[in-house]
Amino acid sequence: MTLRKHPGDLLLLGLFLLPVVVVAPALPWGSQGWLYSLAELAGVFALSAFLLAGMLSARIPGMDPWFGGLVRLWTIHRWLGFSAFMLVMAHVLLLALATLPMSLGTSVATLFPPLSHWEVWVGWAAFLNMLVFIAPTLGFIGTLHYQNWKRLHLLSAPALVLALVHTLMLSATAWVWWLLSALALAAIAWRKLLSPRLARKPYVVDGIDKLARDVVELRLRPKGKGIRWRAGQFVYLTPMDRSLLAGYGEEHPYTIASGSGDDELKIGIKAVGDATRALLDIKPGAEVRIEGPYGTFFENAALAQKGTGLPGEPRKQLWLAGGIGITPFVAGARDRVGNTVAQGPDACLFYLANRPERAYYLDELVRIAEACDGFEVHTHYMNEHGVITRDYLAERCSDFAERDIYLCGPPGMINHLQTLLRHEGVPAHRIHTEAFDFL
Ligand SMILES: Cc1cc2nc3c(=O)[nH]c(=O)nc-3n(C[C@H](O)[C@H](O)[C@H](O)COP(=O)(O)OP(=O)(O)OC[C@H]3O[C@@H](n4cnc5c(N)ncnc54)[C@H](O)[C@@H]3O)c2cc1C
């Protein structure tokens, strides 16, 4: 089912299993015992997962929909990294256990041989390197500031090289590792060297609309040919204005808030840290670079329906937005204005905010709802109504649990609504969420 929804998964599975298929038959299953071969197999799986995680860092615009969107790809990347780390530990533990029946000394000497067996020590160096860059991701040493975490993550490159050297020196089958490492290297070279030059398009800030004390909407005009996008997609924006207090040259993901037919690219930004706060003061004429678009937020329902094999009309939609998580829905609403192609199924939007002043896009959304059939807007103010309930939703949208449901907002809101929807019997494949903190 997932392969019908995400055809790219077949490629990922093939690449992940290829080394095992090639290497497993050549392992010494009989001569050195199955535990020893299992230890080797854990090492093979670990390097496969590590190399695949490297390949998934490529971020090529237009390719992520094959895999269910960039957010899903990052989730797979993270799981692969975590699995590689756990498998390396299993590799070490199984090697110790496999040689323990001979003697404790043999077991220790297998793991810590004389320095002349440098290929084993290279393996240890790879493991320690991995430990350093994975520890903050797993929260072992608290959370790092995002940019520091990103810098530390660069250690994954030497860790990968060391793990490869270790494996190539000890493995009888080399070609499969050369093939996968060439793909991983190409992916990393694209991401770090080529994409900043080839994939980022120059745009100019045409105007800035202040929506609230800490929220602005940037209107961007391409210098040359701009990107094309669909509602619900996001881009990486890199400010190239040295007068900004922070964030010069840093790429950050933001959802496109303009409709797909708009001339301008509109990005709603809420200040949460250094880089976003600095953008509140960006001036018209400043240059930014735009990379993308990425994501499949509004296509997920069609993909889920395809995955179930059920034919039929697209279902009506329920949109639940909180805080700056309103931006994909603003794009969806703007798409409906004067754009018959992009009308889409009926949609009912609940705009969740603490108080009326925090519903910064409300006036425009209400105007769109008045002008477009099949689009409704409701508000929910936490200060006034408390936590949102099923009765609150049902009074305003009686068939809410029968719809395809889209959620975007702070984690607390998403968790609460997911629990509420599950209690109402909404199956998971009809609930689509966009997280703004996927890394
Ligand atoms: C798919 C997606 C769409 C988003 N759309 C919007 C939007 O429309 N409007 C909006 O205001 N915000 C959006 N965000 C969030 C926005 O990217 C962060 O608020 C911003 O990057 C914070 O940077 P900072 O330096 O100001 O804050 P920091 O204090 O550095 O970061 C705060 C948190 O933001 C995340 N973050 C920071 N930098 C990055 C990065 N380069 N890549 C990924 N995550 C990062 C981390 O989880 C971090 O903990 C979106 C995020 C994602 C993943």
Image (cartoon, grey):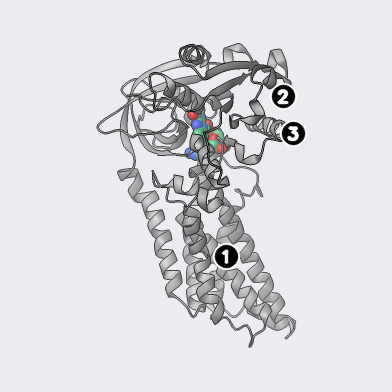
* Pick the front one: 112 or 7: 7
Q: Which residue is depicted at the point 53% across and 14% down?
A: 362
Q: CA distance from mark 1 to mark 2?
A: 45 Å
Depth check, front residue: 334 or 154: 334
Q: Residue at x 71, y 35 (%)?
A: 425
Q: Label 2 crowding class (10 Å Cα cut-off): few <14, some 14-19, many 20+? A: some
Which residue is depicted at the point 42% across and 16% down? 209
Residue 169 visible in the current orientation: yes
| Residue 121 placement (x, y as % from top left) | 56, 72
Residue ID for mark 1: 46
Cβ atoms at labels 3 and 2 below 8 Å apart: yes
The amino acid type of the residue labelled 2 equals Arg
Which residue is more in the foreground, 103 or 302? 302
At mark 1, the secondary structure is: helix
Along the polypeptide, which appears first: circle 3 or circle 2?
2
Crowding at mark 1 (Cα within 10 Å: few <14, some 14-19, many 20+): many
Instruction: Give the residue pinned by disc 2.
Output: 390
- Which residue occupies the extreme left position in the image? 224
Q: Which residue is mark 3?
A: 423
| Residue type highlighted by circle 3 | His
Measured as percent of width and height from the top left, residue 38 is found at 64, 74
What is the number of the mark on residue 8?
A: none
Compared with 225, 62 (above or below) is below
Q: Are marks 1 and 2 in contact (CB under 8 Å)?
A: no
Residue 95: percent from left, percent from top: 66, 75
